Image (spheres, rainbow, N blue to C red):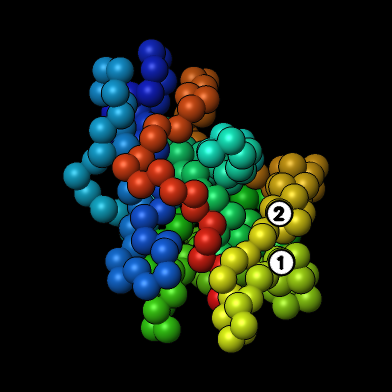
Amino acid sequence: MGHGVDGENSLPTTFFKINGLKEGSTEIFFEGKVKEGNEYVLIDTKPTKLYGHLTEVSVKEFEWKDETHKLVRLVIDDADERVVLEGGFSNVMVGLVNTLAGNKEAIDKIELGVYISKKGYPSMSISIDGGTWEDNKWKFDYNKKIKPLIEVTKDKKGKIVATDKTALIDFLVKEIESKDFQGKIQGTPPEKAEAQVAAEMPDFPDSSVEGDDLPH
């Protein structure tokens, strides 16, 4: 799944974000960039699945409009290629983190698929070590734990016009960085790469911050 080369002696690496998270999107896919020389260029394909050995889940901070934002970062390796997926705390990424947190066993292989649900919502299928979506369990109940951490602002007609997920993000960052969560991430490619992933994610054409697709 990886393309290009990320630095000297590094695995061929493709950097992905999810394209199609906005409300009303009719298409969703993993948008990828690879490094060619000193530049990052878009790949020609629009994959809807990423798979391999999950070797890292972490949180990355970046500055946008004088504010600090946080991203979820996944590194998926195979013997000769690497995939890096980054995304804000959108409904899709929150569900992914919740699923990983709810898995009681060590996690090696993972397969992620994105699609638009029958109701028109951006969605993600998650397979852990060959299992199906039916094997997945969320650690945190959405209505009891996740939803109360989202502050909403409504207009006079009761329509949600803004959401503040600061409390939710802080809660999930603490979970991701916990010893229990990190202890589950044990992806081991056939020949584990010694090279490090680049610290910076390339800029994508749409620089808007992900994470605004929580239920309205």
Q: Which residue is mark 1?
A: 151
Q: Nearer the viewer, residue 137 or 62?
A: 62
Give the number of the disc on residue 166.
2
Name the residue type under label 1.
Glu
Q: Nearer the viewer, residue 178 or 41?
A: 41
Name the secondary structure under disc 1.
Answer: strand
Question: Residue 171, image x and y in percent?
Answer: 77, 54
Identified at 46% across, 44% down, the residue is 85
Q: Quadrant of the C terminus?
A: bottom right
Identified at 80% across, 42% down, the residue is 179
Q: Quadrant of the N terminus?
A: top left
Name the residue type under label 2.
Thr
Question: Residue 20, image x and y in percent?
Answer: 37, 61
Q: Quadrant of residue 215?
A: bottom right
Question: Residue 14, image x and y in percent?
Answer: 36, 36
Classed neighbour count for the residue bearing mark 1: other residues with Cα under 10 Å, few (<14), some (14–19), many (≥20): few
Q: Do the numbered discs 2 and 1 sit on residues whose CB atoms are within 8 Å?
A: yes
Is 194 situated above or below 183? above
